[in-house]
């Protein structure tokens, strides 16, 4: 009969009265592995194969003559289970998840762990799981073998005490032990206030629970250096060893409309690893003035204009230039209160309206207004609008 290592077998024989048949059971290498040679029936034996191969069952006549009948069964009483995952937890420590159970042993059984072939010891699998009951494991494994890099963790389910079967291999998983900072640039937004971008995320160095530095770059140029020490309960939940104090947030001045913001976690001094890119985000922002020439009309011999203008980079009032038929007519500061504009752009306040009064001849004119980019800020002068005045 063909048996796999770990499979169990049971053999029984009956013979006619007045006969004595005996059983011999030979392993694949020809050695006698088991048997039964008593004087009465049934002759029976059983055990567990420790090697895989074809076993030979031999019936010998010891006394008398007649018929006999042999019955046998093959069973698997070795443990079953699965190493589901191995994840990094903290320096030199991983967590191994899975389950293991023995079909002919009532209690929880042990699982033995190896990293790169080195024995890490064996621990009882009795962690309660919805799918397998109290036969799971979520085993913390600490070893100086878990140096930075990739390691192979393997697990064996240990056959239940005094039960049939052999220990079973239940899987290997690769686990990466990081040494360079990990983390994320979670988000980026305009503000707070005009002319700034704010960004936030988290980072930690796997070699220490202490906060580390994060450096922010805008279009490849250094923009800010922060300490990632703000409270992030979600990070503390996923990395209990490191605690929650690994968040960062900060803001940088906007210097251009197209911004590629990148965050780097700075490797903790004196630890293995190197600075690590946590992520980049791209944001395009308005930097040139916005606004409107709402009105341009004649009042007697005067041209009256009104409108509003804002430079997104500042809450201060900016200049507006008025042109008539393409000829510069005058400059005005758009600093009059405009409640509607203040309500629409709360970060900029209300003082962005303008009105002008200037002499004009009695003819058709085209009146245009330009918002003048706030000096020292990115952006260009912008045509706010034109009106035809009859
Ligand atoms: Ca067993
Ligand atoms: Ca490090
Ligand atoms: Ca600007």
Image (cartoon, rainbow, N blue to C red):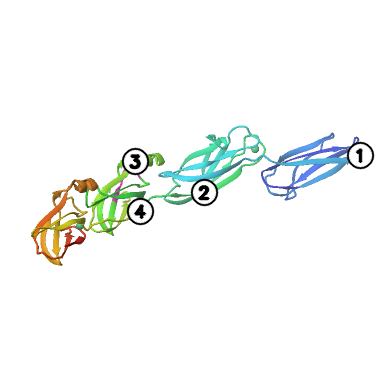
Tell me which segment is drawn in magenta. 208-214
Of 198 and 231, the residue lying toward us: 198
Callout 2: few (<14), some (14-19), or many (20+) C-alpha neighbours within 10 Å? some
SS under mark 2: strand
Callout 4: few (<14), some (14-19), or many (20+) C-alpha neighbours within 10 Å? some
Q: Which residue is mark 2?
A: 173
Residue 232, numbered label: 3
Of 289 and 168, the residue lying toward us: 289
The residue drawn where x is 36% and y is 39% is 233
Looking at the image, residue 95 sits to the left or right of residue 298; the answer is: right
Q: Which residue is mark 1?
A: 64
SS under mark 4: strand
In the figure, residue 282 lies in which quadrant? bottom left
Q: Is residue 77 above or below residue 173?
A: above
Who comes first in sequence, dot 1 or dot 4? 1
Looking at the image, residue 336 sits to the left or right of residue 201; the answer is: left
Who comes first in sequence, dot 1 or dot 3? 1
Who comes first in sequence, dot 4 or dot 2? 2
């Amino acid at each position: 009969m063909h048996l796999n290592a770990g499979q169990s077998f049971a053999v029984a024989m009956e013979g006619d009265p007045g006969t004595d048949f005996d059983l011999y059971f030979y392993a694949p290498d020809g050695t006698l592995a088991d048997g039964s040679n008593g004087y009465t029936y049934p002759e029976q034996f059983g055990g567990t194969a420790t090697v895989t191969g074809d076993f030979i069952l031999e019936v010998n006549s010891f006394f008398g003559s007649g018929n006999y009948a042999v019955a046998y069964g093959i069973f698997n009483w070795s443990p079953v289970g699965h190493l589901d995952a191995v994840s990094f937890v903290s320096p030199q420590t991983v967590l191994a998840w899975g389950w293991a159970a023995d079909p002919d042993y009532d209690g929880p059984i042990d699982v033995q762990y190896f990293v790169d072939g080195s024995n890490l010891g064996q621990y009882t699998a009795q962690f309660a799981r919805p799918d397998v009951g109290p036969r799971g494991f979520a085993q913390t494994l600490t070893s100086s073998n878990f140096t930075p890099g990739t390691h192979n963790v393997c697990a064996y389910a240990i056959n239940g005490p005094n039960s049939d079967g052999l220990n079973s291999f239940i899987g290997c998983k690769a686990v990466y032990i990081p040494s360079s900072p990990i983390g994320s640039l979670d988000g980026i937004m305009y503000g707070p206030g005009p002319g700034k971008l704010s960004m936030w995320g988290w980072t930690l160095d796997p070699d220490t629970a202490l906060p580390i530095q994060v450096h922010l770059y805008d279009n490849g140029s250094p923009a800010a250096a922060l300490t990632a020490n703000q409270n992030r309960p979600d990070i503390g939940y996923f990395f209990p060893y490191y605690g929650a104090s690994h968040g960062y947030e900060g803001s940088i001045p906007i210097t251009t409309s197209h911004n590629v913001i990148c965050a780097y976690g700075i490797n903790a001094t004196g630890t293995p690893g190197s600075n690590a890119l946590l992520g980049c985000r791209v944001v395009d922002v308005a930097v040139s003035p916005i606004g409107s020439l709402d009105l341009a009309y004649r009042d007697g011999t005067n041209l009256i204009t009104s409108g509003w203008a804002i430079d997104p980079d500042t809450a201060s009032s900016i200049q507006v230039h008025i042109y008539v038929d393409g000829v510069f007519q005058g400059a005005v500061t758009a600093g009059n209160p405009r409640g509607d504009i203040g309500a629409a752009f709360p970060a900029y306040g209300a003082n962005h309206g303008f009105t002008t009064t200037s002499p004009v001849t009695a003819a058709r004119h085209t009146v245009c207004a330009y918002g003048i980019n706030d000096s020292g800020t990115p952006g260009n002068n912008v045509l706010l609008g034109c009106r035809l005045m009859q």
